[in-house]
Amino acid sequence: MPIGFSLLLVSIAIAPVLIPFDGSLAQSLIEILAAMALASVATTVRAADVNLAAQITSRLRIAVAIPAIWMLIQLLPMPFSGMTHSIWINADEALNHRSFGHISIDLGQTIQAIIFYLANIALIIVSVFAARDRRRAELVLFVLTAIATLATVLLLIARFLPAARMPFGEAGGILAAVSSLGIILSLACGTRAIERAESRRSDPSKPKPHPGKALLYAGIGLLLCLAGFVVSATFNIWLVTVFGVAAYSSVQIVRRFGLAGWATAVFVATMVIAAAMIILWRYNMGASLSPVLEFATAASPDAISVTRRILADTGWLGTGAGSYAQLLPIYQELGNPITKPPSTAAAWVIELGWPMTLFVFGLGIGTIVALYRGALVRGRDSFYSAAAAACALVLLLQAFFDASLLRTGIAVLGDAIIGLGLAQSVSRGSGS
């Protein structure tokens, strides 16, 4: 486990470097680290930890495999022409021969997408095993907070210092995503410091608490992330982050006031209804835009226009995972600098199709519910699952607003956060 844990920390630590240098090389590096970490965990993990991890992920294991299975299906030759992309039919006509086509228009890119998806799942699994130990969980939380803060600072420098803008390029667009995660993680660090101080005061045998330094570091990280958030976030991102902070704070309110089960249910239902009403208020029912483009207000009109045309030509089965970049030259005008989709949701609909995109969002909602429920029943150390639920909520909703979740660095941070939250959603006592 120490090797797997170290590789996990390395994957998190290099996230700021992956932001400006994102691409196939960055993904390959994460895939190698994830494979090595998972192999290390597999050779050192104990049977008791395997059973506990199986209990934690019992409701998610099969669901997580379905997107990978669908991407594999996109690679297979399809016997019916109605299921294949028209590019294969046109190729047959041009070459004057008959062959089975595929759903994916680029088999190589889809294979790479499958490998990267499996690498993300591997990082979550490694995080679940590594963060079962309390000291390791604390170290993972500290490293995540420090890296999110560091990435925010680097992106702030790139935003305001022309000399530093070149290596980061358009990466400044994900400043809001990184800083919003940093805000929630900093709040979790502050909560941890307060809870540790309270537990030591209640036990005279423990050393006298000194939470001031931990709170100072958490406060500095919070202020830096708030600075990055203020200068970069759109109104929609503001709303999303408010939802995330509210989700995190609601767990603390339930625990601090000791709300009964029915009161907790009413409180949570009120928050969900309020959030749904705000989203409906922001959504323009009369607009001709697709729901996956309606909230992408930070994207350029050209990017929206190109993506609309691609969506209009995309069937329900998609064009193949990882194929968006291959479609751009067909639809964009010459000299157009578009390289990324307006939103992650739009890319998923184009590549995976509507049914699988809806399933992925359902899987995200199920993960958030599992993390939030774990935070409510956990008691001490509930801030891990609460922070993970809040961060997962932010990432899921931001998928409609920008393409930050397609960045390798953001994906790695999200993997580690979710794995940490799942690991600490069940106590060792309940697992045994």
Image (cartoon, rainbow, N blue to C red):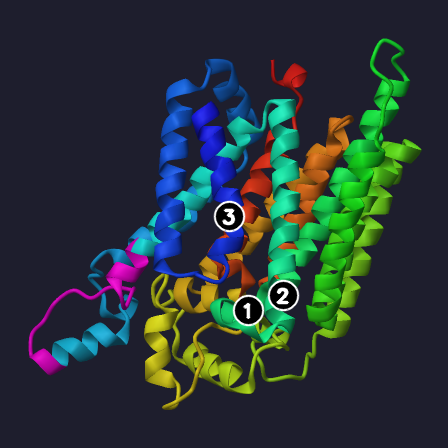
- Disc 2/disc 3 C-alpha distance (Å): 22 Å
Q: Who comes first in sequence, dot 2 or dot 3?
A: 2
What residue sits right under mark 1 in the picture?
Answer: 164
Question: What is the x, y in percent for residue 421?
Answer: 63, 36
**Label number found at residue 311:** none
Task: Please state if 272 lies on the left or on the right of 345 as rendered.
Answer: right
Q: Is residue 68 visible?
A: no
**Amino acid type of the residue that numbered disc 1 sits on in the rendered structure:** Ala
**Label 3 crowd (10 A; few <14 / some 14-19 / many >=20):** many
**Label number found at residue 157:** 2
Q: Is residue 313 visible?
A: yes
Q: Is residue 92 above or below residue 348?
A: below
Question: What is the x, y in percent for residue 218?
Answer: 77, 43
Question: What is the x, y in percent for residue 247?
Answer: 77, 48
User: Which secondary structure lies at badge 3?
Assistant: helix
**Label 1 crowd (10 A; few <14 / some 14-19 / many >=20):** some
Which residue is painted at 48% across and 62% down in the image?
A: 20
Q: Is residue 146 above or below residue 376?
A: below
Q: In which quadrant of the rendered view does residue 316 lie?
A: bottom left
**Looking at this rendering, what residue extends furthest in the top direction?**
205
**Label 2 crowd (10 A; few <14 / some 14-19 / many >=20):** some
Q: Nearer the viewer, mark 2 or mark 3?
A: 2
User: Which secondary structure lies at badge 2?
Assistant: helix
**Amino acid type of the residue that numbered disc 3 sits on in the rendered structure:** Val
Question: Magenta region: which residues?
Answer: 94-111
